[in-house]
Image (spheres, grey):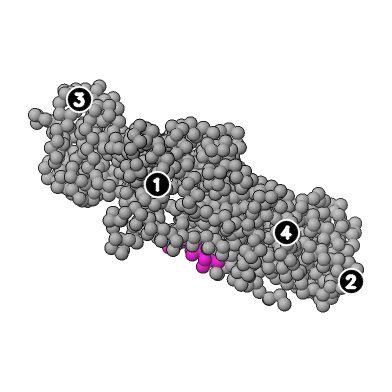
Amino acid sequence: MIPSQFNAKEVEKKWYDYWMKNNYFHSKPDHRQPYTITIPPPNVTGVLHMGHMLNNTIQDVLIRRARLKGFNACWVPGTDHASIATEAKVVAKLKSEGINKNDLTREEFLKHAWDWTNKYGGTILEQLKQLGCSCDWDRTKFTMDPDMSASVIRSFVDLYNKGLIYRGYRMVNWDPEAKTTLSDEEVIYEERQGKLYHLKYAIENSNEFVTIATTRPETILGDTAICIHPDDERYTHLKGKNAIVPICNRVIPIIFDDYVDMEFGTGCLKVTPAHDINDKTLGEKHNLEIIDIFNEDASLNSYGLHYQGKDRFVVREEIAIELENIGALAKTENHLNKVGTSERTKAVIEPRLSDQWFLSMEDLVKPAIKAVLETEEIKLYPSRFNNTYRHWLENIRDWNISRQLWWGQQIPAYYYGDGKEDFVVAENIEDALRLAQEKTNNQQLTIDNLTQDADALDTWFSSWLWPMAVFGGIMEPENEDFKYYYPTNDLVTGPDILFFWVARMIIAGYEYTGKKPFTNVYLTGLVRDKQRRKMSKSLGNSPEPLELIEKFGADGVRVGLLLSASAGNDILFDEELCNNGKAFANKIWNAFRLIKGWEVADIAQPESSKVAIEWYEAKLQQTLVEIEDHFDKYRLSDALMSIYKLVWDDFCSWFLEMIKPAYQQPIDRATFDKAIEMLEANLKLLHPFMPFLTEEIWQYIAERTPEQALIIAEYPKAISFDTKLITDFDFAAEVIAGIRTIRKEKNIAMKDAVALMAVNHENASTYFDSVIVKLGNLSDLEYVTDKVDGALTYRVKSNEYFIPVSGNIDIAAEIAKLTEELKYTQGFLRSVQGKLANEKFVSGAPPQVIDNERKKEADALAKIATIEQSLNSLK
């Protein structure tokens, strides 16, 4: 028995278990053409959110469609170790247990990190299964898997040996909360309201002072010079003199350099080489002292004097008061400025001088620029992101790849002495010892003399190898999987990581293989709420994805998300969209139940059914062409809408009505078989979008072996079709709509047959007359040359249609009703025309009011003409 209602919850578990049991998701190299997607690996400790729902639904649609089209579809899932985010969670957990990370050895901390990962890691992948994602779970990867880590280490060693990785003492972006450096791209600049402090620096051995404006008064304790433009005549007398820093009373030189803008502020600049990139450049040029006043958590160190140990923002408030008390604060103003914050922790970034590892990008980036912007070997969808891509890559700086963290791949540099250059780089400590012995010409060195660099590599330095490393392409570039599946086909991700991840994967792909890592990049939009706000737990506007699935079913949620998800545009999410998806699932289920409920007999096929089948086959083919075009352009929302209209409007509303047998009568076998065939074609088109519902119906239609499951069925083939059938039916549909309108307006019951006469000015096709007769419940359809008296009439284009009213309605009552309606409309017209004839009204009323009255006049005139025509035909 077919259930009366579609039970999503029961069906989803049943068919996912069936698909897993029969290994449909698993791929291995064979004779077929591969179609490969690698998942953008979510954080290992993450849980499913709306962005994941959208991104992975799109990937599943692409992979299921490829599977149906005969490709060897391979979707590689996995997770990212997310060094900063995961280490922060582990540190917080340890803190709650009274354990300080600094009291642990690296090995002890990593044990805690692995315990955390093993407990919470992979939750998101299990949640993706509830969405219906058909990943090859046998290939699941984690960026800290031994083979994945080995790939990262080999990549580092290779790039170092090529001279592309180097160690440098540079000004870096320091995250004082995570206590690590960040790359430039991980810093988000936000406008914030702050203050501008005008500070007075006394000139040594004089009563004079200079005023300098700063947004950060706490950094004066690290000042080592004041800089002035050499052409600034206001200050030429200060050449060779010194100034005194307030509070710390440090004597610092006044230097002159054309770097300073004479027109900005007072023309004087305080120089703090340890805490500003431009100041560091000035410091190197003028051989200035470098004084770092901050600890790694951005509290002040001993150079902070009596502020030692206090947080920088606390000191900012307190030092302003002290400066005012000693007469060194001239004034304070409100000031809007851009503040760099950590993308991960949201902490305000500190510029900090530090020894770090860098990757030289100048030459590496060239093939990636060419592939997207010149040869278009790789295409971004939508293409407007090419401009963003160009800006980032043409202005790229060397990549700071080291992080002061323990969770991640440890940098494979081994130190054998106290000097900065006393190190070697190797894949393991045994190779490092051999290299160190060769470099020092000292065979007495042992492993105990080597110390590995404590820093870990940036997470992105791991994930930029993802499409290669998941197939073993770094460690074994000649292995069968890598040669078969790489390059991959499509990448689906968000534009926010276009540089972090997408561009870097392209760079790595060309560096290691000379090939692109993928062909197409589909950039999704952000999921926002109806008020266009970004979804977040703090705002309370982000629905729980699993609760949505529970409420609307996975298919309903998938349809709801995709109907509004045009490439690159933000999605304004509304739960009602998921409700629409659920309603669509119910519509399809009920259509299937209707067909299966018909009694089938070996009787002649009606002409109307034969015509209906020909039309629907053509309509299906027309839609197939539309779908292919939409997929080619990565317009998945439009592709789904085309299928939605085909199934809801054409199949359910028209086709099934056209072939439906009369009440308690059987349907002929030829038509029934074709109806099932058309339903199965619809299910194939729908399956990528609604996998559970479609598999359930597919398996109910007939007894199927595992080899006949819908998930591996053959996608409908495009064949030539007669477009005239479609245009002719569209005309016929308007004729039917006209009959139905008159029936409704005149209360003529559908069971009461009526006659229809037509004047065929359009020379319209009569091919669908049998359908018009059936759906209009006509006793007769006759073509005439003249108008028919005593009939209700309507037009389709220039064709005129007449329904004789004798016996169907009370003519006298209808004339009286129309006459009354005519009088009312004429009275309404007079009142409107009276207003428009009133010059005072016309000159004083707003234009939109006048336009509205003119529209009322036009509508009334049209209605009067229609009523008069109907009256004439009845008299």
Determine whether, in the image, residue 780 is placed left or right of residue 379. right
* C-alpha distance separating marks 4 and 1: 47 Å
Tell which of 303 and 137 is nearer to you. Answer: 137
- The residues colored magenta run 539-549
Tell which of 561 and 738 is nearer to you. Answer: 561
Figure quadrant of the N terminus: bottom right
From the image, tell me which residue sits under label 4.
713
Mark 2 vs 4, N-terminal side? 2
Label 3 is placed on what type of residue?
Answer: Arg
From the image, tell me which residue sits under label 3.
234
Mark 2 vs 1, N-terminal side? 1
Determine whether, in the image, residue 191 is placed left or right of residue 361. left
Label 4, secondary structure: give it.
Answer: loop
Q: Height in image: 707 above or below 424?
A: below
Figure quadrant of the C terminus: bottom right
Determine whether, in the image, residue 541 is placed left or right of residue 9. left
Seen at 53% across and 63% down, the residue is: 126
Q: Are marks 2 and 1 in contact (CB under 8 Å)?
A: no
From the image, tell me which residue sits under label 1.
410
Callout in the foreground (3, 4)? 4
Any mark on residue 446, and which? none
The answer to whether one can see residue 539 in this image is: no
Q: Residues within 10 Å of mark 4 (few under 14, many from 20)?
A: some
Q: Residues within 10 Å of mark 1 (few under 14, many from 20)?
A: many
Is 544 included in the stretch rendered in magenta?
A: yes
Q: Are marks 3 and 1 in contact (CB under 8 Å)?
A: no
From the image, tell me which residue sits under label 2.
602
Q: Are marks 3 and 4 in contact (CB under 8 Å)?
A: no
Label 3, secondary structure: give it.
Answer: helix
